[in-house]
Amino acid sequence: MAIQKHSYDGILESYEATLRWLDTLGVKIEPGRTKHYREVLEYWTENYRSATKWDAQKIFPDFVSAIFEVMAFIEIYESFKDVPIKDLAGITTKLNKGVSGPLNSADENANTSNARNFIFEALVAAKCHRPLKNVFAILDAESDTGFTLQDKKIWVECKRVTSPKKLEANIRKACNQLEIVLARNFGSDDRGMVAIDVSKLINPKDELYVQITDHELIRSIGIMMDNFIRDNFRVWEKVYSTKSKKILGLILRFSFMATSEKSNLIVHVAEWAVNPRLGLADSEQTFLQRLVEIIGSQEQT
């Protein structure tokens, strides 16, 4: 897959459209992170061609957080912009809670992580809303979010994991929450999945990831996800061993800023994957394969 490189002008234009949409939803965007990101993008869009190396280093932490967060807001907007506002109350609530918090993600701690947690919930909902593929986010989900696919309801609990020591506890908590929802829908064909963002485990210091060529960048991102699953799948399989068989597995995501030396352009990289629980029935394996086709591809912007 070729890396999609949008100009900074294009990103700023999309973000301006996103901010207008947020305003129509009633999301209170100023003052706060969203205003700060617009200012950073405006500065970089006007100056990146003439910026010195020192300029780039000075603005880099702000720029990384700005692009990192802006692309999440834009993806949410692109997924839901055609949905009637009256149907988006749940997403609006998440966005209202998600626009606060530290300006830079590197400054986040356990006491200030709630805002970005809500954005991750909205982002998972956006990723699973693909009407043209007959996949629809459950906008009034009993869990953090959910979606319908092939007449099956999938409830999703979302966790952003910020420490390797917290991986098992986060997945266990999500499974416990899913069991409560599934118990309320006893006798149905509903299922559950856990969605985890592991960006902080892959790149804890929000450093720029560099490869020589675009091809190497794409290949290495896929390997990075494969290695994370290989190194950690026993953690979640241990949790599954005492949990409902209706919990099908994990949706995983990480994202960070990257560049290749050949292209010399900083891009936002987001990788999604689905890891099925061991021992699933063939029909459920097939179901998750369909989900992989929808959300399992790389995105570089």
Image: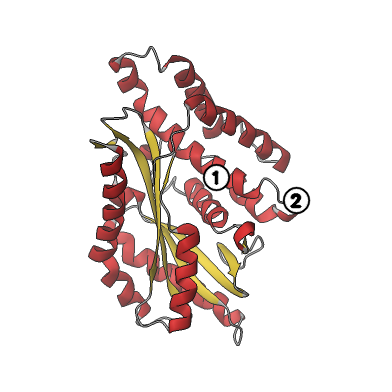
Q: Which residue is mark 1?
A: 75
Residue 68, above or below 281? above
Residue 172, above or below 103? below
Q: Residues within 10 Å of mark 2 (few under 14, many from 20)?
A: few
**Mark 1: which amino acid?**
Glu
User: The C terminus lies in which quarter of the figure?
Assistant: top left
Counting from the top left corner in percent of width and height, residue 23 is at: 69, 36
Q: Residues within 10 Å of mark 1 (few under 14, many from 20)?
A: some
State the residue in front, 212 or 78: 212
Residue under the image location 56 percent in, 40 percent down = 74
Viewed as shown, does residue 203 lie left or right of 45? left
**Mark 2: which amino acid?**
Pro
State the residue in front, 84 or 299: 299
Q: Is residue 214 visible?
A: yes
Residue at mark 2 to residue at mark 1: CA–CA distance = 17 Å
Q: Is residue 245 visible?
A: no
Residue under the image location 26 percent in, 54 percent down = 223
Viewed as shown, does residue 210 lie left or right of 65? left
Counting from the top left corner in percent of width and height, residue 259 is at: 31, 34
Q: What is the secondary structure assignment of the residue under circle 2? A: loop
Q: Earlier in the sequence, mark 2 or mark 1?
A: 1
Residue 183, above or below 270? below
Residue under the image location 69 percent in, 53 percent down = 88
Counting from the top left corner in percent of width and height, residue 6 is at: 47, 32
Which disc number belongs to residue 84? 2
Q: What is the secondary structure assignment of the residue under circle 1? A: helix
